Each structure stands twice: as C-alpha cells, then as structure tokens.
C-alpha cells in the first residue's frame, strides 16, 4: 500500500525520547518542552512560542484570548477541517462561513464585499446586520500549506477592527517571499497562530500543537491557561478557568528531533510535488492544483483536480484504493455539517465545485520516484 501521509522518523527523535525517559521527565514538565518552544521560536523568527496538546487547543486559546464570547461571531472558511470551526462553539459563539478562491484559501474579495455591504461599525464592534451580532475575528486557514493572502487579510482586519487568527496547522515552514511580508512565516502574521503536530503533519509529535501571539502578554496568558491557570501551584489557588493543554516532555523530545529535519522534509515534498506534476503534464483530465507564487510553501498535501466530467471522484478513489494507493477526498464543507447547517453563509460558489472535484494523492516524505510513477500510471489506467 502506498499510504497517503505517514510520519518519517529518521533523525535524533529516538535519542531525545530515550534521554527524557532515562531522566524521568515524561509529563508536562521537562527540558525538552522548553527546548522545543525555543527552537521553534528561532525557526519562525518570533520571540516565543507555547507548546500545547493539539492544534485545536491552540485555536481554542487563540479565540479565547481574542475576546470571543457567547453570541459573538467569527468569519471562517467552509472549506477546511472541522477542527478549525469547533472551538468557536466551545465559547458559545457562531461561525459565519465564507467561500474559497482558486487557491482553496478564503476568498478575500468576497470577504471584503461582505464586510463592506453586510456589516456596520458600532461602538460595540463590527455589527453583522443580518444576525444582529458582533463579529470579533477572522479565522484564516492556510489550506494544505498554501499561504493565504495575508496582506489583504491584515488590511481588512485593521480596517474593521477584527482579530486575525491564523490556522497554520498545515503550513509549518510556509513563508512569504515577496511583498511587504517577505520573510514572514504562516502563523506569525496575524494576532495569533496555531500549529499542529498530528501524525500526518509535516513534522509530528504524535499529537500536539503550538501557539504564537503578536503580543507577549497574550502568549504568557496562553501558557497560564494551558496549565490549569495556577496562581499559586503550591496552595492550589486558581483565579480563572484553566485547561490541561500543555505538551508533554516526551512529545516535545520527539518534536525537537523532527524540527531538525523540517527543511529537508520541505525540500523533499517540493521535489515530489514537481515530480508528480511532470508525470501529469500531458494530461487534460486531471491536474495538480498550483501553490501560490508569493510564498515558499511547504507543499504539505497535493491536490489532484478532476477536470473531466467523465471522472467521478468517488469511483476514482475506489479504483485507486484497489490498486493499493491510499487517497482521500477533500473535507465535507462545514456549512453542510449537521451542527452548522443553520449558520450564516456568504456567496459560497466555488467551494462545492472543489469539494467534489479534488482528491489528495500520497505525499509522504518517504515517497520515492517509483511510488509516484506507480500512482501516475494507475491514474492513466483508470
């Protein structure tokens, strides 16, 4: 079986984990947690980061620290994994679903039009005239590691006094190479950024996440909240509701080893994407979706677009799986999920097309050219 996306552990991961175990530091305290945070901050060129149990935890704390409360609203993409949306509901708030553009990221033109025509600035904040509720933030996802249009999003959020939360759970290592944001990494541009180290991400800690924040005080508050909001740990004094969101030392030890390999992984994923593309260049029925040209993207996942009306997505996936090639569809659109069917949407037109015409091809770092030749040949046969 050629799997979709599997972790590759080829560096110092075992050595660091053995060291953590030998020293007895396996829980949320230990030197590797601090080391992982420090080395990740240096990589991302930010003052500090906070290591957490998951990307979802990072998103939850980002929203909490953005002041999102009951009956507030957050503008979100419908085309993304549901983990980006659920934390909004944890806080009693509501998502407003936005369409995607041809990069699969949030359509900033439609977002601009929505803010201009459907909303009014008030003393309490940006009023959504349709719902009568206050919009507090925009949550953008860098889908499959492809940098969203952050220049436009920064301008719009500044203009309408909205918090900008980046879901960079798929985009570790993606950075701007052009324009005013040149050198800035996905997850370090908005007010908050969230990363994931799940097993299928470009680097993994088994499970785990990380948060960045524009303001130092917000990041310190995130650490405080992630450790059960301990005001006096000796006497068990807690003045706020806290969470058990801190990363363990074992996970962090794995992360330190993985981070040392990150740039090699990005180079491999970029090479493999281009190799796939060369194999499919003469095809008209299928094509690989391009990544944006204003960033060095990490090429986490590869999106195969079905251009022919004679190709049915589900039939194609079934045939590929029979050939022992693991593929997956893009996510079910969130505004069609049972929990969110009554939420507001705005001109969702492209997302349904892409949802029904894209499959993700195997993209593991350990793919070899023979694997990709096999996948491309199977696509021709079916």
Image (spheres, rainbow, N blue to C red):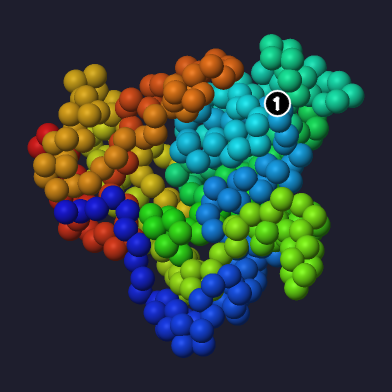
Q: Residue at x 34, y 50 (%)?
A: 273
Rendering coords of residue 365 (x, y %): 34, 61
Q: Is residue 92 visible?
A: yes
Residue 225 appears left or right of 7: right
Q: Is 5 drawn above or below residue 26 in the view shown?
A: above
Q: Is 176 drawn above or below residue 133 in the view shown?
A: below
Judge the density around disc 1: few (<14), some (14-19), many (≥20) Cα neighbours within 10 Å.
some
Q: Residue at x 67, y 46 (%)?
A: 62
Figure label count: 1
Residue 113 appears left or right of 282: right
Rendering coords of residue 350 (x, y %): 45, 21
Q: Is residue 190 visible?
A: no
Q: Which residue is mark 1?
A: 71
Q: Residue furthest bottom?
A: 22
Residue 368 appears left or right of 229: left
- Image quarter of the C terminus: top left
Quadrant assignment, res 216: bottom right
Rendering coords of residue 287 (x, y %): 30, 35
Q: Residue at x 44, y 25 (%)?
A: 337
Quadrant assignment, res 381: top left
Quadrant assignment, res 233: bottom right
Residue 214 appears left or right of 287: right
Rendering coords of residue 102 (x, y %): 47, 29
The answer to which of 359 and 331 lies nearer the viewer is 331
Q: Residue furthest front?
A: 235
Q: Residue furthest right?
A: 123
- Image quarter of the N terminus: bottom left
Task: Determine whether the residue tagged by mark 1 lies in a helix, strand or loop.
Answer: loop
Q: Residue at x 51, y 59 (%)?
A: 208
The answer to which of 11 and 377 lies nearer the viewer is 11
């Amino acid at each position: 079986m050629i799997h979709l996306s599997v972790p590759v552990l080829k560096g110092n991961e075992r050595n660091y984990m053995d060291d953590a175990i030998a020293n007895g530091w396996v829980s949320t305290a230990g030197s590797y947690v601090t080391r992982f945070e420090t080395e990740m901050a240096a990589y991302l060129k930010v003052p500090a980061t906070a290591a957490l149990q998951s990307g979802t935890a990072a998103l939850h704390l980002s929203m909490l620290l953005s002041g999102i409360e009951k009956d507030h609203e957050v503008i979100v993409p419908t085309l993304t994994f549901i983990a980006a949306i659920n934390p909004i509901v944890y806080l009693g708030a509501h998502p407003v679903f936005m369409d995607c553009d041809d990069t699969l990221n949030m359509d900033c033109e439609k977002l601009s039009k929505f803010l201009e025509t459907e909303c009014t600035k008030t003393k309490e904040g940006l009023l959504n005239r349709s719902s009568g509720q206050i919009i507090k933030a925009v949550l953008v996802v860098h889908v499959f590691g492809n940098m969203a249009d952050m220049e436009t999003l920064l301008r719009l959020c500044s203009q309408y006094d909205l918090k900008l939360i980046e879901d960079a759970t798929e985009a570790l290592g993606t950075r701007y190479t052009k324009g005013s944001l040149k050198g800035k990494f996905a997850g370090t541009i908005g007010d908050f950024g969230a990363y994931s180290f799940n097993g299928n991400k470009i680097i993994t800690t088994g499970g785990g996440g990380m948060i960045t924040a524009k303001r130092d005080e917000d990041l310190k508050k995130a650490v405080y909240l992630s450790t059960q909001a301990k005001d006096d740990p000796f006497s068990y004094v807690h003045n706020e509701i806290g969470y058990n969101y801190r990363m363990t030392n074992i996970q962090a030890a794995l992360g330190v080893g993985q981070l040392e390999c990150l740039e090699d992984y990005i180079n491999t994923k970029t090479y493999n994407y281009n190799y796939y593309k060369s194999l499919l260049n003469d095809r008209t029925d299928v094509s690989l979706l391009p990544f944006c040209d204003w960033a060095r993207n990490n090429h986490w996942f590869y999106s195969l677009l079905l251009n022919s009306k004679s190709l049915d997505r589900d039939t194609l996936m079934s045939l590929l799986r029979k050939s022992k090639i693991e593929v997956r569809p893009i996510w079910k659109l969130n505004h069609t999920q049972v929990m969110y069917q009554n939420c507001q949407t705005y001109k969702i037109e492209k997302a349904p097309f892409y949802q029904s015409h894209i499959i993700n091809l195997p993209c593991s770092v350990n793919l070899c050219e023979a694997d990709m030749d096999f996948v491309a040949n199977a696509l021709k046969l079916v």
